[in-house]
Amino acid sequence: QTFPGFRPSFPSAARGACRMGLLDSKYDSPAPPSSWFCSRLPISWRRWLSVAAAGISVFTMGGLCFGFDSIYPVLYSSGAFVDYCPAEQAAICSARTDEQRWLSCCDSQVSAIVSVTSVSLFGADGVMVLYGELTDRLGPRWCMSVALSLAYLGIMLLAIAGWLGAAASDALWYFAFPMLGLAGPGIFMAVLSFGEVFPRLEPVITPLAASMFDGSAFVFLFWKLLFLHAHVPLFVIAAAWLLLTVAVGGLAWSLLLSKRKTDAMRAEHEARSSELAPVSGMAQAPAIVWHSEGDGLRQLFCRTDTVLLLLFMCTANLNQTFYIETFADQIRALGASAAMLPERAEEIVELFDVIFPLLSLGTTPLAIFLVNRYNAREHVYLGVVVGLSCLFGLAQLIPFHGPQLAAAILFGPARTLQWACYFHFLASPSRY
């Protein structure tokens, strides 16, 4: 066991052979293990159905909390946390026209919604390690089951709160969004196990899941468009989305392996690795190995590359989370100063809600190319990640329209590529 959720999918001797291309046809056996649901499907169908289910399930439920800025007008219009406002002001807000209801009622209401946003994002960042441990101990199906239960409950609470409107208890909002934040990483971790069943598709599945995780911020933007422009009630939107996610999540769950089949697959890979032992006298290309025999979890965490990797991910992720939560306020503050015109600031705020998820999704081909083309040269794709993160950070620091627009454009690709390469690097066989 290495990092939670990233148990090496085949032993070190076989990994070295895979680096030299010997496992290209042997490791993906003619009949990879399958769940009962897809046991009668052709292997090619199972392979690409797993890829599609991984991408769609993460997109529809994975990173909804990253699109909170888009749903704020929907919450204001639905009367969420309006009880935090003084009674006279709340009465005035309830009498506003439809065009004005999407504006906040008071600062206390805004603070309450921002607090829910912070709790949800913190949960999404902090619960990943627990899902990894759950996947290791009970298998990806249990991980997906827990995550789907939280996602379904969160969406159902949103539907109930939307149906009740201003009469909804604040507890409904307080529980609904954090549940969505806690659910997303579990769905993401579960679908990564498809890369163990189909190893040659791992460089596709990991970047795809990472891009869909950030791209799912588009979901709340879609909800806002339906609510404000098509005048679809929130409870109808949430109820329809619940039905969609039940179908998508059920498909992904049915394709995942149980713990018993996962263990059997790993045991078969162990046995098959002995068949790939190098023949005496054969010239073998030396494999780059970063570990010593007998290294445990403590030695792994204390290694220089691990410490630097985690330090980079922590600082980069903290900056990104802060940026998501405060982006609109930062840009509008610049618009109120001499650094930027107010109308230009509003253009960037509105543009960010669209380009963040779209460019995150558009980064998928680049991420797949990098991890496939430079699979054995980790410094190349990680160098691109660090370079993009630095460019984003530098643009973020310059308080003028051009650099701030560049930061908004770079944010989605930099974040998506960072997570895609991070998880691919963690699963690199040469590390263990």
Image (cartoon, rainbow, N blue to C red):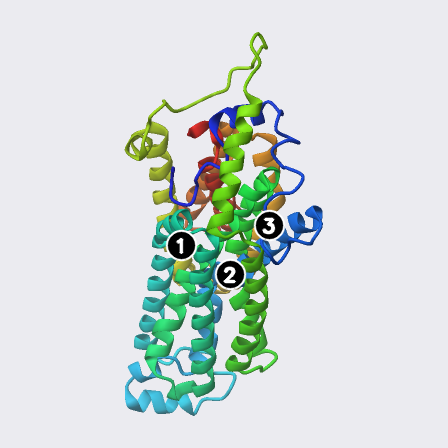
Q: Name which residue type carries label 1.
A: Tyr
Q: Residue 28, position in %: x, y?
A: 63, 37
Seen in the picture, residue 290 relative to 1 is either above or below; the reply is above
Contact check, label 2 and label 1, Cβ < 8 Å: no
Q: Nearer the viewer, mark 3 or mark 2?
A: 3
Q: Residue 126, position in %: x, y?
A: 34, 53
Contact check, label 3 and label 1, Cβ < 8 Å: no
Quadrant of the image for the C terminus?
Answer: top left
Answer with mark 2 or mark 1, whichever residue precedes in sequence: 2
Q: Which residue is mark 2?
A: 217
Seen in the picture, residue 25 relative to 180 is either above or below; the reply is above
* Residue 5 lies in quadrant: top left
Quadrant of the image for the N terminus?
Answer: top left
Answer with mark 3 or mark 2, whichever residue precedes in sequence: 3
> Dot 2: what SS?
loop
Viewer-closest of 429 and 33 = 33
Q: How many residues crowd mark 1 within 10 Å: few (<14), some (14–19), many (20+)?
A: some
Q: Nearer the viewer, mark 2 or mark 1?
A: 2
Residue 282 is labelled as none
Q: Name which residue type carries label 2.
A: Ala
Mark 3 and mark 2: Cα distance apart in space: 32 Å
Seen in the picture, residue 301 relative to 43 is either above or below; the reply is above
Which residue shows up at 48% across the image and 79% down it? 159
Mark yes or no: residue 325 visible: yes
Mark yes or no: residue 406 visible: no
Q: Which residue is mark 3?
A: 34
Residue 323 is labelled as 1
Mark 3 and mark 1: Cα distance apart in space: 42 Å
Q: How many marks overall?
A: 3
Viewer-closest of 22 and 301 = 22
Seen in the picture, residue 396 relative to 343 is either above or below; the reply is above
Which residue shows up at 33% across the image and 87% down it? 89
